[in-house]
Each structure stands twice: as C-alpha cells, then as structure tokens.
Amino acid sequence: MGMALMIIGVVCFIAGYFTYSSSKEPVEEKKQVMATTDTIPDTAATTQSSSPPSSDAVVKSEPNTNSKNELEKVIEMAIADGVLTSNERNIIKDIANTRGLDYNVIIKDIENRITTSGTAETEIIDVNKRSGDDFEKYVVQKFDKRFFKIKEWAGDKYVTGRYAQTTQHPDLLLEHSYKGKSSEFAVECKWRSNFYKGGIEFGTPEQFKRYQSFESKRDIPVFIVIGVKGTGGGPEELFIVPLKEINSNFIPLRSLNNYKKNTGKNFYFDAATKELK
C-alpha cells in the first residue's frame, strides 16, 4: 500500500512539472519578443528622422532663407526711419540679383511704403547726407563767382512724401557769363566713399531718366560731377561726366577715367563746345 501511494505521488509530480513547463514557455517567449520590440528602433522612422539633409538641400535653402531675412531687415530699417540710403539700395540690389528678383519693383514698393507710412524725416541727418552736402559745397567753390552764378540749388528736404519739384532736378543750375554772353547748364553732385563693382552708380535708373528728361526739356547740358574716396569736402579723385555721353546710371571705371579732373583746379566752362572741364 505504501509503495502504491509513493508511485502515484511520483506520477503526479511528473505530470505537474510538464504542465508547468509547457505553460511557462509561451509567456517567457512573449516577454522576449516584447523586450526585443521595445529595444530595437523602427528602422524606417530612424532613417527618416536622423539622416542629415543632402548638401544640395543645404546650399539651396540656407542662402535663400538668409537673404530673405536680410532683405526684410533692410526694408524694415528704411521704412522705420523714412530714409532709403544708397548703402541700403546697394544691399537690396545684391540680394535681388542673388535671388532673381526685380530690384526696381522692390525699390518702388519701399518708396511707396515710406510715403504712406508717415515716418519720413523732415531732413536726412546721417554720414552720407553730410558727406553729400559737403561735396556740393566743394563743387560750388570750384566755380569762380566772377563767371558763374548759381540760379538754383535743389535741396533734399521732404516730409511724408512731399518735396519741392526741384528735388528731382540736378543739384545745381548755373549760369556762365563771359564777354556779354551767357549759357546755362546743370550739375548733379555725387560723392562716393569708394568704387562699387568696378565703377560708380551715381543714382537710380529712375533718377538717370529724370536727368535725361530735364536736359531735353530745358535744352541745356547736364554734368555728373563725381568725387571718390577722401571726404565729401576733400575727395581724392574727381570726375566730370557729361550726361549725354553715358547710357545708364552706372559708369564703369574705364569710362570714368576719360573724365578725370585735377582736384586742385577750378572748373572751366567752354561756351562754344558746351563742355565743363
């Protein structure tokens, strides 16, 4: 009897052991699968999120973003103080050329926004303005008052889009008188701290057209007197360029050199040939 009970106990133990083992394996296997799933990242997701952009993408996107931000900053500054300086125009032109934008459309839009914003200052007071004023005075002193009379001296003052009509004319309207004969001519004065892209941009395309229109309507010669480097009151280089001999608002250095003037000498007007030297 005791032996029988022992045999029955062993059989029950063996049966229970196999039942326990068979029920445990799926659970552990499931745990291992779950652990593997948690620790191994999704290959597609990882590749998509961590892969760096191609070099082409960086080259194409970053300059456009930077230039766009720079353009917006320049526009905001111009509108804020009501003044579109020559330096700001040059920056805008470079950005426009880089991004394939229409420079003239951008400038016109800025000028319209300055006019309607009501932020334009009554008088521009900055380094460029002072240098420009000084250069105009320098040019005026080159005309001997025994033979030249200033008939008009256009100013640059304006407020909220209002300005005198002469503001759009060349800076100086002069009359030359000698031996009972007199002749009129006009002078636009431009001082630049240095050459720009191998030449001088003395104004906008619109200004160039206005000077051409002024010359045609008044039937008098117009000259662009340009001072470069030094200061407005004492330029290192001086040029007298007849408007009729140029075809745009930009004058290359190779052309400028044909009109170089000795800074130590006064100006002379030849009434017969209508040349300012």
Image: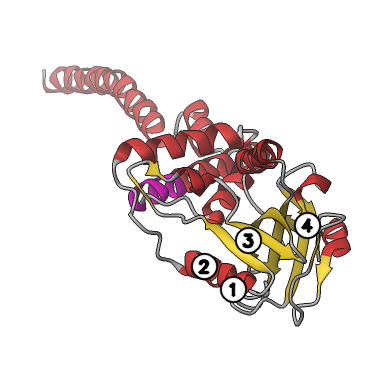
**Residue beneath disc 1:** 232
Q: Residue at x 86, y 64 (%)?
A: 257
Disc 1 marks a residue whose amino acid type is Gly
In the image, taking residue 86 as reference, residue 274 lies left or right, namely right
Residue 197 in view here: no
Crowd around label 3: few <14 · some 14–19 · many ≥20 (10 Å) = many
Disc 4 marks a residue whose amino acid type is Val
Q: Nearer the viewer, residue 269 or 53?
A: 269
**Residue beneath disc 3:** 189
Q: Residue furthest bottom?
A: 264
Q: Is residue 193 above or below residue 53?
A: below
- Tell me which numbered mark, 3 or 4, is placed earlier along the sequence: 3
The disc label shown at residue 241, or none: 4
Q: Residue at x 66, y 75 (%)?
A: 146
Task: Report the number of discs.
Answer: 4
Helix, strand, or loop for circle 3? strand
Q: Alpha-carbon distance for marks 2 and 3?
A: 9 Å
State the image coordinates of residue 79 (x, y, percent, origin top left).
37, 46
State the image coordinates of residue 153 (x, y, percent, origin top left).
52, 59
Helix, strand, or loop for circle 2? helix
Tell me whether the residue at label 1 lies in contact with that at label 2, contact meaning CB atoms closer than 8 angstroms.
yes
Mark 1 or 3, which is nearer the eye?
3
Disc 2 marks a residue whose amino acid type is Asp
**Residue beneath disc 2:** 133
Q: Nearer the viewer, residue 259 or 99?
A: 259
Crowd around label 4: few <14 · some 14–19 · many ≥20 (10 Å) = many
Q: Alpha-carbon distance for marks 1 and 3?
A: 10 Å
Q: Residue furthest left?
A: 1
Quarter of the image that includes the C terminus: bottom right
State the image coordinates of residue 32 (x, y, percent, origin top left).
37, 30
Residue 48 in view here: yes
